[in-house]
Image (spheres, helix red, strand yellow):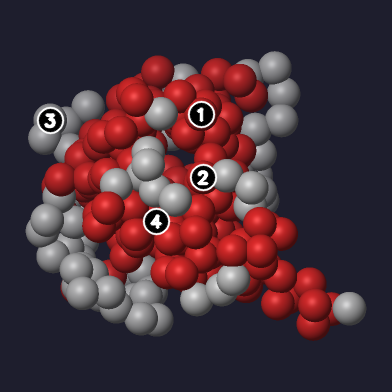
Amino acid sequence: MAETKESSVNDADIIAAAAIRLAGERGWRNLPMADIAVEAGIEPGTLMRYYLCRPEILDGFERMIDRRMLAGAAAGDIDDKPRDRLFDIIMERLDALLPYRDGVRRITRELPFDPASAMVLAASLPRSVARMFAGARISIVGPAMPLKLAVLSGVYLATFRVWLSDESQDLGKTMAALDRQLDRSMSLICGTFGRSKPSEPVHSDGPPDVVEPEPVSSRRAPSDQPKNARAPRATRTRKKPATAK
């Protein structure tokens, strides 16, 4: 039974990945399910056991990316500050998306003309953001949870827009944009995204770490590099904000 479940998950991911790759070549709105089955190397009947329509495939793709994001974050340094862990988890998600960027770009452009897919992505965003907090080991339970989800959603979307057009090998523009967005957001909510696990002491002489972030520790290189993959993380450093807080 366990083998069957593992096989099903792998088949679902293969289909989702094939669909997004094909979208990069042929567009998303009018992409036939039968063509997705051919690209994935399966029978149309097998595809229908997992997904009945393109928006369902898109939701499956988002879940696949979330799992890869969390798997990459699992090796992070538990001694990093919450802000640095949030930086890393967002970059982990963009790393996972990188092999599919052509398809993601095409889908993003077509969203205004595809309401069903737009609604799927809108509904999946809070789930993905909650998993970012979980992967960064930051608790958001409490009355401020909707605010924290909304703020980090804004951080991610603003960074995502830069990532879509960032062709640099090390994604330097994307990292600089993420640094700026995190600085602004932390100031908005008094310099913290919530209590981390384990909890960290707050100094009595003011909000902690609002000034300038320390360089983040080197992050692991992806196991397999796509043709447009950036340099290993060990060769990159975080970009400092343009203006000091």
Q: Using the rendered view, name the quadrant where residue 147 is placed.
A: top right
Q: What's the residue type where badge 4 is placed?
A: Ile
Q: What element carries label 4?
A: helix
Q: What's the residue type where badge 1 is placed?
A: Ala
Report, in whole angstroms, how far the alpha carbon at label 4 lies from the one at label 1: 16 Å
Circles 4, 2 touching at the beta carbon (< 8 Å): no
Question: Label 1: which residue?
Answer: 116
Seen at 71% across and 30% down, the residue is 141
Q: Is label 1 or label 3 in front?
A: 1
Decide which of tag 4 and tag 3 comes sooner along the chain: 4
Report, in whole angstroms, how far the alpha carbon at label 3 lies from the one at label 2: 44 Å
Place of residue 204 in the rendered image (x, y in percent of width and height, measured from the top left): 52, 27
Looking at the image, residue 189 sits to the left or right of residue 222; the answer is: right
Looking at the image, residue 154 sits to the left or right of residue 184; the answer is: right
Of residue 8 and residue 124, the one placed in the foreground of this image is 8
Question: Label 2: which residue?
Answer: 54
Quadrant occupied by the N terminus: bottom right
Q: What's the residue type where badge 3 is placed?
A: Thr
Q: What element carries label 2?
A: helix
Q: In this view, does 159 lie above or below 114?
A: below
Decide which of tag 4 and tag 2 comes sooner along the chain: 4
Q: What's the residue type where badge 2 is placed?
A: Arg
Of residue 147 and residue 238, the one placed in the foreground of this image is 147
Question: Label 3: which residue?
Answer: 243
Question: Label 4: which residue?
Answer: 20
Graded by Cα atoms within 10 Å as few (under 14), some (14 to 19) or many (20 or more), the crowding at tag 2 reads many
Report, in whole angstroms, how far the alpha carbon at label 1 lies from the one at label 3: 41 Å
Seen at 66% across and 67% down, the residue is 46
